[in-house]
Image (cartoon, rainbow, N blue to C red):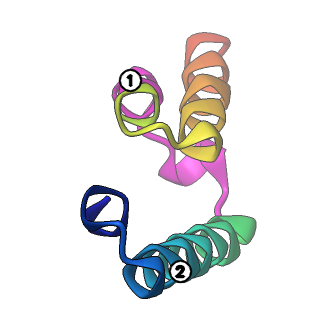
Amino acid sequence: MIGSVTGSKAWADSGAHDKAQGIQEMKDASASRDPQKQGMGRAEEIAGKMTGCVGMEEEGRESKNITKNK
């Protein structure tokens, strides 16, 4: 965001790199996660929507449905 506001290509590139790295780290962390045991359901789904994290939103929806069907 700072790179966009200031017009600094270096900051914009750095921000894009950091974002991509963060997304990959979240994907790696959730790869071994069992939504049946570690899901937070609706709260996680809403947090995913608020932050724009599609994976978190989907995992929340999945764990919410698993909990509801027990």
Q: Which residues are magenta?
A: 33-46
Helix or strand or loop: what does disc 1 sit on? helix
The location of residue 20, given as percent across then percent down, is 61, 73
Which residue is at the front of the view, 51 or 66? 51
The location of residue 61, given as percent across then percent down, is 60, 23
In front: label 2 or label 1: 2
Whether 27 is among the magenta residues is no
Q: Residue furthest front?
A: 7
Instruction: Please tell me how crowded label 1 is: few (under 14), some (14-19), or many (20+) other residues with Cα within 10 Å.
Output: some
Whether 41 is among the magenta residues is yes
Residue topped by disc 2: 13
Residue 46: mark:
1
Residue 59's place in the image compared with 14, above or below, is above
Would residue 11 be found to the left or right of residue 56 on screen?
Answer: left
The location of residue 40, given as percent across then percent down, is 41, 38
Q: Which amino acid type is marked by label 1?
A: Ile
Q: Residue furthest right?
A: 31
